Amino acid sequence: MKKHRTALSAGVALVLVFFAMATRGELPIGERIKEARNAGSVTNLTAIYDEIESLWPENSKIYFQNQNQLGEALEILSPTNSAARQLLERQSASVLGKPLATNNLAADSYFSAKEATLRRLVRIPKLTPALRTAQEIATTIGEAQAAVISNYVPVQVTMNVAPPVLPTAPLKSNQYIVTMSGMSPDAIEDPVAREAYKKAIADNELGKAQNNLQRNLPDMINDMKTSFRQYCHALFWQDPGAKNEIDELAKLAHLTEKEKNDLAK
């Protein structure tokens, strides 16, 4: 009887282990990043990094959001963990090397992730500055400045899009078509009305993204320029020959003459 209970207990424990592993695998990437960070597991963070990389470019917005969370976790571990620093350098290079997505919904996440990555590179003195990284940063700053719309007028958006007026048709429950803002497009049977509603939702989301981007760009550009100046100072101190590239860096970043001169100080 005792052996039977022991075997049963072992079997239950094994089931619980597999259940826990399956549950962890189903957690959102952000939650798994927190778990790995709290456990100090660079191995798990490396696996998550590879998973995030697979999101590019189809899910570019989620890609940059998750990379930002991963960078934050690696920065926390990096002061005492050389493997975390190495992964952070690899992760930073990947984020900075990604081109501006053609998906306008991802633009705000794109610039936010790159700005945050640059700040991390400046904050961690043990990371080695490189001219290639400086060029990628300068390119991002130039893209951000080019994306600014002068005298931008915010697009009118709504929290929940109202569906279009539908043609009168009987429903199973009553004789009226009931619609409400934010309802699922799948609830609309008429294909023309359904597609019009989907387009209205997509346009509204694009308007939100555009408003967010134009609101956030000025501060992000200023922060990136400040961090870029610090990064270049560290780069030129370590590699004086890199100073010969100031003109190119200033051109990529669309810097003023004064801003270019500040890089060399």
Image (cartoon, helix red, strand yellow):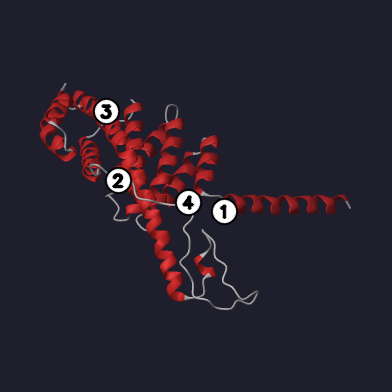
- Kind of residue indicated by mark 1: Glu
- Kind of residue indicated by mark 4: Met
Residue 114 seen in the current view: no
Dot 3, how many residues are within 10 Å of its Cα: few (below 14), some (14-19), or many (20+)?
Answer: some
Instruction: Please count the marks in the image.
Output: 4
The residue tagged 3 is 226
Q: Which mark identifies residue 26?
A: 1
The residue tagged 4 is 159
Q: CA distance from mark 4 to mark 3?
A: 35 Å
Please report contact status of discs 2 and 1: CB closer than 8 Å, yes or no: no
Q: CA distance from mark 3 to mark 2?
A: 27 Å
Which mark sits nearer the N-terminus, 2 or 1? 1
Mark 4: which secondary structure?
A: loop
Locate residue 252 relative to residue 155 in the image: left or right.
left
Mark in the foreground, 2 or 1: 2
Which mark sits nearer the N-terminus, 4 or 3? 4
Which mark sits nearer the N-terminus, 3 or 1? 1
Which mark sits nearer the N-terminus, 1 or 4? 1
As displayed, is residue 208 above or below residue 262? Answer: below
Mark 3: which secondary structure?
A: helix
* Quadrant (top left/top right/bottom left/bottom right) for the C terminus: top left
The residue tagged 2 is 153
Which mark sits nearer the N-terminus, 3 or 2? 2
- Identified at 29% across, 55% down, the residue is 102
Q: Nearer the viewer, residue 132 or 212?
A: 212
Mark 1: which secondary structure?
A: helix
Mark in the foreground, 1 or 4: 4
User: In the figure, residue 246 lies in which quadrant?
Assistant: top left
Q: CA distance from mark 3 to mark 1?
A: 40 Å
Q: CA distance from mark 2 to mark 4?
A: 18 Å
Q: CA distance from mark 1 to mark 4?
A: 29 Å
